[in-house]
Amino acid sequence: MCGRFTMRAPSHQVAQLFQLEMEPELIPRYNIAPTQEIPVVRIDPETSARELTYLRWGLVPSWADDPSIGNRMINARAETAADKPAFRTPFRKRRCLVPCDGFYEWMKHGKSKQPYYITMRDGKPFALAGLWEPWERDGEIIESCTVLTTSANDLVRPFHDRMPVIVSPHDFSVWLDPKVQDPHKLEPLLRSYSADEMTAYPVSTLVNNARNEAANCVEPMIS
């Protein structure tokens, strides 16, 4: 699964990676948690250009009566998202990319759990596959999103059997294109990312509390 991640990369790196027309204003985030507003890249329906905006993490289906349902929809299984009632429409029409430069997983050690930080070996930002959806009731409007997950690669598997889908830059255009609606054309993009390009190391239990948002969340733990 994917329940916590970071987005610390400088704005110019993000603009370059996602080929944004304008450099976004980003604040380094070290412990992003569900229900928070997170940066996503999507296609602006009016201009057809890529835009970086902020959506609530936890997808609220357009048909939901209570938006709190989104608290349970922070992730969607890539293998079944195209068929699930909550995700099938955004899977076809409203896909997005979630800028990220690392995520956390936990490993059991006796009665406790040790958090690990998982990132790219080169330390550069990357993109998670996401879906987004608008919801409106009685004048209240919420735009929310979910992160797709797939089978874990060899690096992540000791921590969890699932990992977020990481989209390669050469697949960004296809993933974001709302005209591409055939799930069979999108499924090849949702494979596990190469473990050889990633690394993991233990970090402080500070990340267990979502209120902790300091740089020391990602510092390697000294044994």
Image (tube, helix red, strand yellow):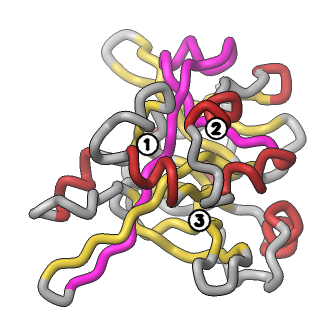
Residue 20, quarter of the rendered image: bottom right
Q: Which mark is residue 3?
A: 1
Q: How far is disc 3 from disc 2 in space, using C-alphas? A: 19 Å
Residue type at the position of mark 1:
Gly
Task: Name the N-terminal-most of marks 1 and 3.
Answer: 1
Q: Is residue 217 magenta?
A: no
Q: Is residue 220 something that shows in the picture?
A: no
Residue type at the position of mark 2:
Leu
Whether residue 200 sits left or right of residue 91 in the image: it is: right
| Residue marked by disc 3 | 40
Q: Is residue 143 magenta?
A: yes
Quadrant (top left/top right/bottom left/bottom right) for the C terminus: top right
Residue at 48% x, 48% y: name it. Answer: 91
Residue type at the position of mark 3:
Val
Q: Position of residue 151 (x, y in %)?
A: 55, 19
Q: Position of residue 35 (x, y in %)?
A: 33, 61
Q: Which label sits in the foreground, 1 or 3?
A: 3
Residue at 12% x, 86% y: name it. Answer: 138
At label 1, counting other C-alpha atoms closer than 10 Å, the crowd grade (few under 14, some 14-19, many 20 or more) is some
Residue at 36% x, 70% y: name it. Answer: 134
Disc tally is 3
